[in-house]
Image (cartoon, helix red, strand yellow):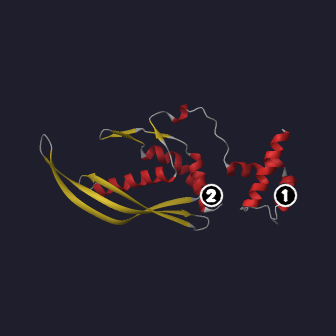
Amino acid sequence: MSIYQKLLKIQENVTLLRKDGTGHGYKYTTADSLFSVIRPVMDEIGLLLFQEILESTSEHVMWKTSRSDKQQTFCSCKFKFTWVDVDTGEKVEHTFHADGFNDWDKAIGSAMTYAERYYILKQFHIPTSELDPDARKEPKEPSFFDKLDKAKDVLGVDKYEAVIKDSGHTSSTLPLDTIGRNALLNALREEAKHD
């Protein structure tokens, strides 16, 4: 499976997350909630994500509250996120910008946490909602890769091998090219018609 197929596998496994955290008058999806869904899939398929600070600027800001003067740090960062396929070493890199505003020693950490959470939410087009995602009643259609993974079981070994051979492959080991994958999916569709 290529690194792009693995990234798609993650996207297919997350359809909705609820906003389970609050702060500064906003509701948001917490990192715990996000990673409790993403991390098991990453571990299963062998993907790592690295975060690197490429550029960083900070500015100390003084402001008045009703009780006293307060000083905090505004930090603006440019990050590089690198996905690494542990099986092949293949990499995919993206840059992402985020800001943090917090006490002196926490501003850069705030920017890093915000960047990581929102990069992943945007990378995989994960919608967030205040509703409970488990309340959605729509059955999940098996993914493309789920169907391919079960093809040998559904078709039987002999028919599976024949479909692979007819598509021009000499071996039934994955990865298959598009023609081989399409041939398997067509055979699965035909098999489903007979059931």
Relative depth, front residue between 60 and 179:
179
> Picture quarter containing residue 183?
bottom right
Residue at image location 72% in from the left, 51% down from the top: 149
Q: Secondary structure at mark 1?
A: helix
Which residue is at 27% across, 52% downward?
101
The residue to which callout 1 is attached is: 161
Amino acid type of the residue tagged 1 in the rendering:
Glu
Report the amino acid beneath label 2. Answer: Gln
Marker disc for residue 5: 2
Q: Point out residue 114 in the picture as x, y percentages from the top left corner.
A: 38, 52
Query: Which numbered circle lies on residue 9?
Result: none
Q: Position of residue 170 (x, y in %)?
A: 82, 66
Relative to 136, say whether 49 is above or below: below
Taking the image as shown, residue 19 lies to the left or right of residue 90, namely left
Relative depth, front residue between 22 and 186: 186
**Left or right: 123, with 152 as reference point:** left
Q: Residue 188: horizontal and vertical position, in percent?
A: 79, 47
Q: Counting other residues with Cα less than 10 Å from the Cα at mark 2, is it few (<14), some (14-19), or many (20 or more)?
A: few
Q: Label 1 crowding class (10 Å Cα cut-off): few <14, some 14-19, many 20+? A: some
Q: Quadrant of the N terminus?
A: bottom right
The residue at the point 84 percent across, 56 percent down is 163
In the shown orientation, is residue 76 left or right of residue 157? left
Q: Report the Cα–Cα distance between label 1 and label 2.
A: 23 Å
The secondary element bearing badge 2 is classed as helix
Name the side, left or right, on which 63 lies relative to 26: left
Question: Mark 1 and 2 residues: CB-CB less than 8 Å, in contact?
Answer: no
The mark nearer the N terminus, 1 or 2, is: 2
